[in-house]
Amino acid sequence: MTGVTAKKVEAAEEGLRLDRWFRRHYPDLPFGQLARLTRKGQIRLDGGRVKTNTRLLAGQTIRIPPDIDKARPQTAQIITSSDKEFMRSLVIYRDNHVIALNKPHGLAVQGGTKTTRHIDAMLDALRFEATERPRLVHRLDRDTSGVLLLGRSASSAAFLSKSFQRKIVDKTYWGLCVGAPRPARGVINLSLAKRRAGSAEEGRERVTPVKDNEEGAQRAVTSYAVMGQAAQKAAWLALKPLTGRTHQLRVHLQAIGHPLVGDGKYGGVQAAQFLGAAKESRLHLHARALVLDLPSGKSLTVTAPLPPHMAETWDFFEFNPDDDSDPFEEF
């Protein structure tokens, strides 16, 4: 077929889902059309058939049908002075290889349907003196705040991406859950699977706990420790995801009966209205710290202050937001 092209997956794109790769490169392509072309084998990966949720590896070749290749490529978003000031205000660490941001609650990392303002579109504001645009090396959900790492070059991004994929980055999250888990320290070992929660055109998914032998089951393990509690009403948790599944922390906590405050999707009304029906419901989940090795060989620890809505809750319950003791030290 004439007009067919092929594109290589870049190192910084490793781990990205196929549908999100297309969303990044061809934002005008509807998901329904992408799903049909994939189903018919018009879109292929290294010559073989592929699903829209397949995770990509660096160096793989994506077959691009001619109609898609005529779609308008994504154009760079104009960075206003206020956007530039805003993005630079998020920086909590910077060196020659890495930039770390304290991502706010409610700001998407990447674009999607009806999402035009997101971090990926404003990364040009963070070039500083470098010639290359910084690159994302991992993701946080829109409603999760905290440490978000960027690679300042293609080589740095590739190094960091592999660190995340090899699970050699130590990640600590803080969350506020409904009730107080017992025991106060433990491990949640519960496989998860994605289940469609709408039509194929909508492409919506929901993560669900499943048995290990069920279709699509992925092993998921989370360590947790109670850092403080308000009687039996709520608990401040430190969380370590030992695997990196979508919505893992949220689903695991809901599965043990202690959903995160503000998590209406998985925790229902109990979690959504925990702080009162009249109060704006915001997810209480924060990527508190990352510990990793840099390309230079230096070990880096980055810690992000709580977002305003969680800081307010910590103050209400008289939790100490400066307490960075490691509850997993002897775990």
Image (cartoon, rainbow, N blue to C red):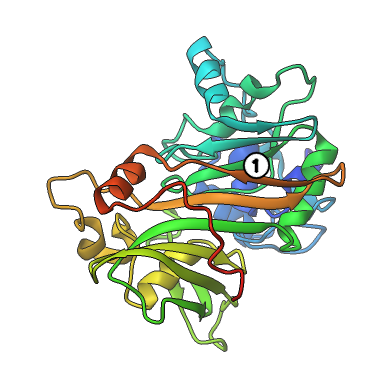
Residue 45: x and y, percent? 76, 57
In this view of the protein, which residue sits in the foreground, 157 or 292?
A: 292
Residue 206 lies in quadrant:
bottom left
Q: Is residue 247 above or below residue 155?
A: below
Callout 1 secondary element: strand
User: Position of 204 compared to 277: left or right?
Assistant: right
Pick the quarter of the image with the C terminus: bottom right
User: Position of 320 compared to 27: left or right?
Assistant: left
Q: Is residue 9 above or below residue 271?
A: above
Residue 22 lies in quadrant:
top right
What's the residue at 23%, 67% (across, down)? Answer: 233
What's the residue at 35%, 37% (across, down)? Answer: 308
What's the residue at 65%, 23% (across, down)? Answer: 126
User: Position of 155 compared to 141: left or right?
Assistant: right
Residue 197 seen in render: no
Identify residue for label 1.
149
Amino acid carrying mark 1 in the image: Leu
Residue furthest top as drawn: 81
